[in-house]
Image (tube, rainbow, N blue to C red):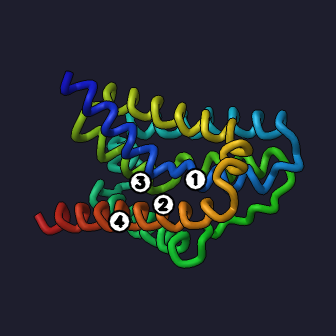
Amino acid sequence: MEYFEKILENALFLLIVINPVSKILIINSLIDEGKQFIKNISVKSSYTGLIILIIFAVGGNFILRNIFRINIYSLQIAGGIILFLFGLNALLKGGFGIDETKDTEEIAMITLASMIAGPGTITATISLSAVYGVISVCISIILAVFINFILMIYSIEIGKLLGKNLLGPLVRLTGFFISSIGMNMAFTGIKEFLK
């Protein structure tokens, strides 16, 4: 039972780092492209993000240490700082600092995929794999990306339901949580470095 609780806990943590609210905002800015367009970019970006995260869950330590010669604590510090700044931007400006006016499917898909499997999520994935094991974390990744995918598919409906008055504060609140996760990740990396 504790094993499944950890999977769910890690899935929720990854979901916060993936940050579905930012995807809802971006997809709502693409409403004129139509439902099929939104479905296509949601499927492609989720699939791409999932593959990238699973690759890093399985071989992240090997890739970092043997190919790039980077220690995990360095990635935790850098990823934590990036996450902190990303969240701080959302907290202060009410947005995620991304050009939301892209009009082609490929650019929108790449933008969304890089937000699913960004530096913070990759760092979290590698760190969680080292602590909880690859299989457990891969299941957590699949759950988190799937929930994010469902929210992306229904972004227009969610945007209408929340309205602009509620979506703005939600972005700022999400930014606060992301900044906090980033700081925690950076401090964990600094602690590991000092050991």
Position in image of residue 176 (x %, y %): 43, 67
Compared with 17, 174 (above or below) is below
Dot 2, how many residues are within 10 Å of its Cα: few (below 14), some (14-19), or many (20+)? many
Amino acid carrying label 3: it is Phe
Amino acid carrying label 4: it is Ser
Q: Are marks 2 and 3 in contact (CB under 8 Å)?
A: no
Residue carrying label 4: 180
Q: Along the polypeptide, which appears first: circle 2 or circle 1? A: 1
On the rendered structure, is 36 left or right of 146?
right
Q: Are marks 4 and 1 in contact (CB under 8 Å)?
A: no
Q: What element carries label 3?
A: helix
Residue carrying label 2: 174
Residue at (69% x, 62% y) in the render: 164
Mark toward the viewer: 4 or 2: 2
Residue carrying label 1: 21
Residue at (53% x, 78% y) in the render: 92
Q: Do the residues labelled 2 and 1 touch (CB within 8 Å)?
A: yes
Q: Along the polypeptide, which appears first: circle 4 or circle 1? A: 1
Q: What element carries label 2?
A: helix
Q: How far apart are marks 4 and 1 (CA)?
A: 16 Å
Compared with 101, 32 (above or below) is above
Dot 1, how many residues are within 10 Å of its Cα: few (below 14), some (14-19), or many (20+)? many
Residue at (42% x, 69% y) in the render: 84
Q: Choose top left, top right, bottom left or bottom right for residue 80.
A: bottom left
Position in image of residue 193 (x %, y %): 19, 65
Q: How far apart are marks 2 and 3 (CA)?
A: 32 Å
Residue carrying label 3: 68
